[in-house]
Amino acid sequence: MKLASDRYTGALLDHSGGHIHPLNLAIGEADAIRLNGGRVYELSAVTQIQHTTPAVVRTAKGQVTAKYVIVAGMRIWAIK
């Protein structure tokens, strides 16, 4: 395959590979959660997760109880 680029000298085609668009993935996941009766809380920095039944998720502005908790975001590993 010839590349129409002066910048790149070669390419690799992997028929078993793929890629995702991170924002579209996040939007799709949030839509699926809502369609199945779940709630999505945005811009809510978690200060503590209590692993009980139900789980208790605490933030600076309050707390939420839930049967299931999905931790997602840019700084999920910063929680101590």
Image (cartoon, rainbow, N blue to C red):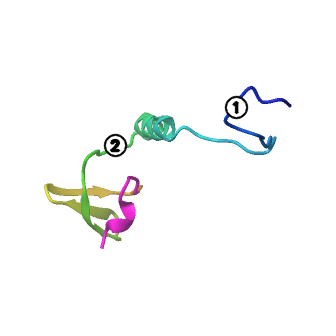
Pick whichever, 36 or 1, lies toward us. Answer: 1
Q: Residue 43 in the image: x percent, y percent?
A: 25, 47
| Residue 80 drawn above or below residue 4 | below
Q: Amino acid at mark 2?
A: Arg
Q: Does 77 appear in magenta?
A: yes
Q: Of all residues shown, which one is farthest toward the right? A: 1
Q: Residue at x 46, y 38 (%)?
A: 23
Q: Residue at x 41, y 53 (%)?
A: 72
Q: Of all residues shown, which one is farthest toward the front? A: 6
Element assignment for label 2: loop
What's drawn in magenta, residue-wise? 71-80
| Residue 76 drawn above or below residue 25 | below
Q: Which residue is mark 2?
A: 39
Q: Quadrant of the C terminus?
A: bottom left
Q: Which residue is mark 1?
A: 6
Q: Residue at x 29, y 46 (%)?
A: 41
Could you say which quadrant of the image residue 2 lies in?
A: top right
Q: Earlier in the sequence, mark 2 or mark 1?
A: 1
